[in-house]
Image (cartoon, grey):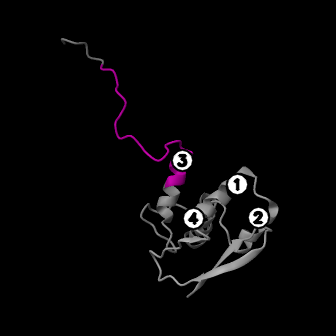
Amino acid sequence: MPTVVFAVEGGGELRCVGVFTGDGPGEDWGGVGGYPLGQWIAEQRRAYTAGTLAAGRVAEPEKLGMVWSEQDAAWADGVAVAKVYVAVHGHFLPPTSAVWEGHPIGVWRRTRVRRRAGLGRTRSCVRPAVPSRRRPGR
């Protein structure tokens, strides 16, 4: 299915600059006007986060479904899936291996619990050294 590519003109007008007919994963979006699309999106996200993107420049990408924060979108997806899981099971204690509606809800929950507990992404398996009560030579 062809995808229409848009660009914002100097006056803030949104116009079609081409139609892309990729074959799926691995497709190369290249760039619009010699400017890589991924770089443009990253710059728009940075400006949006900093609050320096004009209101008109926010509205146009939002009409196209722009995701300003991938982390916020992932959070919202996780919460939505968790609500469905709770509605079906009556609790939110999925095993770590649980996958619900294609979402790894068990891993998602474990990550939230660990971060809340202050464990972060990594956990040391080594116990801290405990001084021995034995005196040397005995």
Tag on residue 57? 2
**Can you give x and y, in whole percent of width and height, for residue 92 in the image?**
55, 62
Task: Please rate how many residues cluster around mark 3, counting C-alpha atoms within 10 Å: few if below 14, some from 14 to 19, many from 20.
Answer: few
> Are circles 1 and 2 on residues that touch, CB within 8 Å?
yes
Q: Are marks 2 and 3 in contact (CB under 8 Å)?
A: no
Whether the magenta-drawn stretch holds residue 97 is answered as no
How far across and down, in percent of the image, does residue 16 sit?
A: 69, 80
Between 112 and 39, the residue placed more toward the observer is: 39
The residue where tag 4 is placed is: 38
User: In the rendered image, which residue does mark 1 sit on?
Assistant: 47
Membership of 114 in magenta stretch: yes
Residue 75 visible at all: no
Q: Which mark is residue 115?
A: 3
* Marks 4 and 1 in Cβ contact (< 8 Å): no
Q: Is residue 129 above or below residue 78?
A: above
Residue type indicated by callout 1: Ala
* Comparing labels 2 and 3, the label whose residue is closer to the camera: 2
- In three-dimensional space, the C-alpha distance between marks 1 and 2, rounded to whole angstroms, equals 10 Å
Left or right: 133 in relation to 120? left
| N-term mark: 2 or 3 | 2
SS label for mark 3 = helix
Boundaries of the magenta span: 111-132
In space, the residues marked 2 and 3 are separated at their CA atoms by 35 Å
Q: Mark 3 belongs to which amino acid?
A: Arg
> Mark 2 is on which residue type?
Arg
The reply to whether discs 4 and 3 touch (Cβ–Cβ < 8 Å) is no
Which residue is drawn at the image coordinates 51% and 69% (left, top)?
103
Residue 2 higher or lower than 70, as above or below: below
Residue 64 percent across, percent down from the top left: 70, 74
Q: CA distance from mark 4 to mark 2?
A: 17 Å
